[in-house]
Image (cartoon, rainbow, N blue to C red):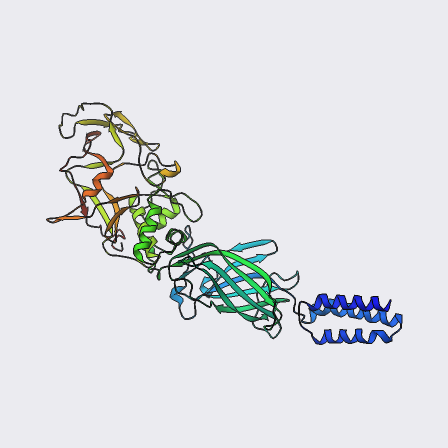
Amino acid sequence: MQVFHNYCCWLIFRINLRFTECSNSEIFALKLLQANNSLNNKTRMIRIFLLLLVIQIYPENGRAQVPELIRVEFFNPKGELNKWISIKDDATGLPVSPSFFEHKTTAWQKNGNTITTLPVAYVSGSYPRIGACFKVGSLANTCSGPEGQVQSNGFARGKMEFYTESGTFLTVELPAKELKGTGVSETYEYVPQPTSLALFTCVQYYEKFKITWEWAPSLSSTEWTIAGESEHPLYVTLDVPKPENPGAGYLHFHTLLYIGCKYGHGGKTNEELVSMVWNFIKEKNVRTVKGDVLKYYYNWTGNSPQAYKTDELLKFHDGRCQSWAKLFLDIFKMQGFQEEDNYIRATLVNSDFFLIKEWSATGAPGTSGNTEYPYENLKKISNFYQNNQYNWEKKEVDYLGGMAQGLEFNMNEFPLANFNLHVFTNVLGTLYDPSYGNKYDQIVQFGSERQLPGFKNAISGSFLEFPPNKMHIKLPLSTWDYFIVVPNSQGQNEDDY
């Protein structure tokens, strides 16, 4: 009986001892055990009961148990506020993190069985500061309260493992630090610490950036126990984003960051970044960070809103060529890259309007009586544009469908396709047309005109308009037809592009 009692006490004590080091209470328990052999059965049982009681109430008296991770916060790099990016919601333009102006973002939080996450963003080369909160027991679900109280609960550290831009597997650590009481029952803070290495030297995107948090009762412990794992989106830009310009529709929108970092992942130079992002844009399957398809002139009849600027395109998900050009350029402004004279407005010389592909003659010859513009179409005056279609009283040229953004989702087969002006971009000396996913030959200076010979490849033909409803059309363009660059209009927020 005596041996059994001693064994039970020793076993219970060792089960608890494996989580911590000896304290005054445990030393007292050991003395109880040592004295047990000289006592009668009744007294021995009382002391065993006292031992069990000490072990059970010890957590309330400072015993260092393995805590549970309940919150992870990211802070601005020390002394480098410009490398700490405020991500703006596409719809509202407000920071996605309500605590950003406190220079922190709660990137991961657990409340009961519910986990919430928020994205964080830094400029490459940053040393983010990261903090965490832990709880002991089942009652506390908050870490609010004063930090750094005298009471402590062991030590914690963080480990981040990922592949670098060169493909090398790398571990970045947060140093082991003592957990300090918050002033709220059984919650403890890991005071924010900078990462041991700079956070990348190129564009990066992690949908689930993982940190494994470990705990030990002391720094001398040989075994560290996992206290939790956090995962949340992380973005790293190539350089400091260009300042916001609300009047021009440019804020540090989440989708701009998402597209630039996800599809420019690994880019180390502006040239690499532009090439990688264009390879995504040209496929005409652009979505926002929330998965909404962005389209070009999808709804072009009735009172459907048409976006002119990036903020409107992200809000309405449907826009004109102006908004697509600005979206493309704003993606790079989010990465810290911007040029002058890169917003290009083009028009056709000698014709009133041009027809974006694809248009085809319904039969030959045309009946207009004009040898250069042989085909004749007559608009329906009352409802020429209706239900995103052209309505004709007579047609010798028919619209077969377009090639614009949204087509790859089978959502935009017939965008508007007759214009007298089109807008695209000039980036690093290359002409990119994000509305149609095309690249064109370079601008050619001819006398006082800046001509765009490559844009003809996107055009089926052109027409002259004779009010109220007559169109004389030629297909294809003649060899002497050409496009020119039109100076940017003032007062349209285009001089920033």
Q: Is residue 90 left or right of residue 330?
A: right
Quadrant of the image for the C terminus? bottom left
Residue 110 in percent (x, y) is at 57, 57
Left or right, 112 with respect to 407, comes to: right
Residue 406 pos. (x, y %): 36, 40
Q: Is residue 32 left or right of residue 107?
A: right
Whether residue 75 is visible, yes or no, is: yes
Measured as percent of width and height from the top left, residue 311 is found at 36, 50
- Residue 419 seen in the current view: no
The residue at the far left in this view is 447
Asked if residue 119 is positioned above or below residue 126 in the image, the reply reads: above
Image point 66% across, 70% down: which residue? 20
41 is higher (above) or lower (below) than 310 = below
Residue 341 in percent (x, y) is at 22, 54
Q: How many numbered discs sit on the rendered protein?
A: 0
Quarter of the image where the N terminus is located: bottom right
Q: Residue furthest front?
A: 168
Q: Residue at x 69, y 71 (%)?
A: 61
484 lies above or below 240: above
- Comparing 111 with 174, the one in front is 174
